[in-house]
Each structure stands twice: as C-alpha cells, then as structure tokens.
Image (cartoon, grey):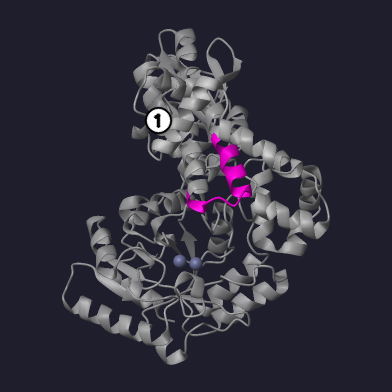
Amino acid sequence: MSNAEIAQRLTALAQMLQAKGENPFKVRAYRRAARTLEAYDESIHDLVQTGADLTRIPGVGKGIASALREIVSSGTLGQLEMLLSTVPPEVAALNEYPRLDPRRAARVFKKLKISRVSELKENFEEGVIGKVFGARMEDHFRAAFRTHHQILLDDADILADKLGRYLQTRCGVDRLEIAGAVRRRVEVVDEIAFLIATDDFLRTRDALARYGGGLALLQSSGREATYQLPASVTLKICAATENAWGTALVLLTGSESHLEELQKLGGLARRSKNEAEVYTTIGLSWVPPELREGRGETVLAAHDELPTLVERADIRGDLHLHTTASDGHNSIEEMAEAAKTRGYKYIGITDHSQSLRIAGGVTVEALWKQIRRIDKLNARDLGIRILKSAEVDILADGSLDYPDDLLAELDYTVCSIHSRFRLGKAEQTDRIRRAMDHPAFTILGHATGRLLLKRTGYDLDLERIAEHAKETGCFFEINADPDRLDLSADNVRRVRAAGVKIAICTDAHRTSGLDYIRCGLDVARRAGLEKTALLNTLPWPQLRRALKR
Ligand SMILES: [Zn+2]
Ligand SMILES: [Zn+2]
C-alpha cells in the first residue's frame, strides 16, 4: 500500500470525525499527519512491516501510529468503517471530497434543501454558495472541490528537496538539477521536474517508483519518466548526457513561449554542454530562468539589455512585521535580533490597527506606548533601526483606522484592506484611492487580497490605483507570504509601468517568517525588477526621504 493511499484513509477518517463533532484538535492532527505522509519519502508500509517506530515521523503520535499499523495490516480502518456506517448516507458520500468540511456541507444542505454532493458542487459552480453564504464559505468549497492539481511553490521546494536527495542516494543519480516551473519560480506549480545523469535510466526509473511506498508511473520512454505524486502534482525525470546537458536543461526549464522564441532563432538545434552556450551561439546573453516566459526577454538578451535582477544581498530591511502586540508570536526585540542576524539595517513594526479585533488590533493608547518603547530601543543603539509603523486598516469609506495625530507620529504606514472584499470594482478602486489621499498613507499592503489556491482577491482597477500612487507619492508591496505573493509578477509589471516603487515585505508573524523574503524576491525577479525599483534596497537616509510625502 502506498503512502498516498494510507494518507487518503487518514483524511477520510478526519472528515468523518469532524462530521461527528469530534474534538477539533484530533481532527486537525489526522489531517496534518495525512499531509506529512503524502510527502514522506520512506514507505510507511515497509516501516510497519519491519516494526519501526512510527512516532519518529513528524506529527505522528501513538494514536495515529496504531491507526497506520491497522491500515497497513488490514487495508482499512475499523473506526472509519464504523463511522461511515453510522452517519447518514449524504454525509458518508462527502468522502468523495475528503477536504470538505461536513458541518459546512450540512449547513448548505439544510438551507438549499438539497442532499447530494453533486448538487452541492453544482450550486458552488453556479456561484450560489458564494451569494448565499459569503466569500469564506465559497473559498472553502473551491479548495475542497479543486481537481486541478497544483501546489504552492514553497511546498514544491520542500518536496523537491526530498525527491532530489532520494534520487541521489537511492536511485543511482550522479548529477541532478531542478528544472521546469519550479526553476522559473512560478508561484503555483503542477509538476516537479529534474534533469538527471545516470548510467542506467531504467534502474533509476524503477528505484524512484518505490518512493514513499510506491508512485504510479504515468508515462515512460527511453530517457524520460513521469509519476503521480501523492501531493497531487506530477514528478518528471529526464536523463541527459554531459555533452547535451545545457540544451536539455534549457528545454526542460521551459516555458513553451520562451522555447518557441529560441526555436525560431535556431537555438535548440545543437547540443551544448552548458546553458550559456545555448544562448551565446545564437547571439543572446544567458537568460535567468525567472525571465523565461516569452515576454520579450529574447529581444532584450539579443541587445544585451536584460535587467540585473535584484538579489537577496540587495535587501536592507523588512517593512511589514507583526509582533505579540497584535497577532505575532515574537516581541519587537526578538524580531529586531532575528533581522539583524539576517544582515538587515532596519525593520518596520506593523502591528494591526484597532478595528481588526480578530487579529488583536492595537488600540490608540497601546500604539502610543509602542511608539515610545521603540524610541527607547533605538536610543540604546541595537545595531538595527526600528521603524515606527502600523498595518492600518483601510476602512469601508476609505478612511484610515487611527486618528491623524497618531498617524503623524509614525515613520510610515502599511495600509491594507481586511474587510468588505466583495465591493464592486469601481467602489473598491475608489476606496483605495481615497485612502491614498490621506497624507499618512505610505505603502499599500497585499494589494489584491488574493490567497493562492484559495481566494482570487478583490475586484479592483490596479492601473488606476498605481497611477494614483504615483501622483500621491505612495508605494506598493510584494507581500512575500507564500500563500499570498501579492502583487503577482504581472501586477508588479503594471505598477512599475506607472513608475511606482515597490517594497518586498514578508508580513512575518514570527522570526522564522523573515525567511520568506526569498519568495518575494522570486516574484520581483520574475517581474524583471532591478534593485533600483525597490524601496527596501535603499540605505536608511534615502529610505527616510522616500517615505516622506
Ligand atoms: Zn494584512
Ligand atoms: Zn500584515
């Protein structure tokens, strides 16, 4: 039995426990364990058979370990069978979509007077669920019904890391390079692709098929194989010889339109050892993988005019951070220390503003206190400058969520929308433009509100907002949270076209969140940004001037 099949039973059990109103911690533990197993490299089946200690798998405690043993030895789970036989048939049928929350499904059943999963799906597709139950509910059903298999780039990185190690240690692979959409740093991917060198492709192919207790082989030829991974994306390996490595890597990295352009220039006709040679033989400079999307990069490469893409070392600080004052997990001092060890010169503390109560919004008095505390910390010379700021809610009418005298004390603000996502396009656009008219508005936070694979974001006219930002001296951010990556690379290009600078911000809620800066850098690089296009590449004296309106 493969890890994928075992994980599927755990997810099914979690769903039925949820239907029975079981302890949510228990439900969550089963769901989490299922996700871990989906990406686990060793075969759970083999581990059970050899009597290994399953609790050394992250997220697997004694209870889940014994469930795993039962699944492997009997092919099923007594508790799951029992639950399935005692719940009403329409609830048992939800098992077809194990990510579906049965309580939410029950609410829809009741209100719409329906009883079948197929009707649930129809209503979702026709937009009825969104209209009747609101955006959150619609997001949930979207995620649960999703059949197009994609994962976030950040999750793909973790998976690719494990797969790469497995290929090198267990499958006789001498050399390997990640390729495809992961190498182009596309924010959501449906395939993980490796270029490999191996003496015996068939042996490598069959060894890899044993990953995680078994992967389904979807397709195979003399030097290529595609598998189905339990995390729902596909895995592709492609073998190349040393002499053709460069050409093969270019081909496997894609995108289609980039390859078409190279094809037209005759760039794929001969075998090259390295990538640079593929490009130079047709008179182009080497194109960074992030730019290989067929957006005119070959023309720039022909004139040696490709941008010098921003790098991690160019970033001097992070301007969107939460602390324990709102919904963060670390103190100002801890965030400052963590930023300092990452080589930053400044950070901005942007806790939530007063109206956002669910995220521990900071009251007016508490923010005054925080301002004075930061002044004291800066006076101590911590080796990093702490900027006084806040993530200020843009209220429904476009006003800001703090009084003017308080806003005037801040070094800058990140202003964001956290409410009324469903406003019409014109109203939403006007709301943000009106907010930008306030002299204390500095950076627009997560401009479109999208959540990758979950929520499309609010309807707005980004070009008009960017124009207004240019007129009023405001900025945008690339929110580097891997779930958001908002702005997208396309939207970054739009904002840059209006001549507006952008900050890459992590929106970190704990010290480790600072490392998501790499995800924001991926977006910036895909948009072709040089360091001069960014706000937080500036040294403090220049940044200070830039932040003044
Ligand atoms: Zn926010
Ligand atoms: Zn935030």
Is 101 or 403 nearer to us in this picture? 101
Residue sitting at x 59%, y 48%: 18
- The percent position of residue 247, horizontal first and vertical second, equals 49, 23
- The percent position of residue 498, horizontal first and vertical second, equals 57, 66
- The percent position of residue 351, horizontal first and vertical second, equals 40, 72
Give the side of residue 519 with respect to residue 119, left or right. Answer: left
As displayed, is residue 423 above or below residue 118? below
The answer to which quarter of the image holds residue 324 is bottom left
Give the side of residue 149 with respect to residue 223, left or right. Answer: right
Residue 29: in magenta span:
no
Is 102 or 501 nearer to us in this picture? 102
Residue type for callout 1: Lys
Give the side of residue 275 with respect to residue 515, left or right. Answer: right
- The percent position of residue 470, horizontal first and vertical second, equals 54, 73
Say whether residue 143 is visible.
yes
What residue did someone put label 1 on?
162
Residue sitting at x 77%, y 63%: 131
Q: Residue furthest bottom?
A: 405
Is 299 or 156 nearer to us in this picture? 156
The answer to which quarter of the image holds residue 548 is bottom left
* Quadrant observed for ligand 2 in the rendered image: bottom left
Query: Magenta region: which residues?
Result: 10-25
As displayed, is residue 30 above or below residue 221? below
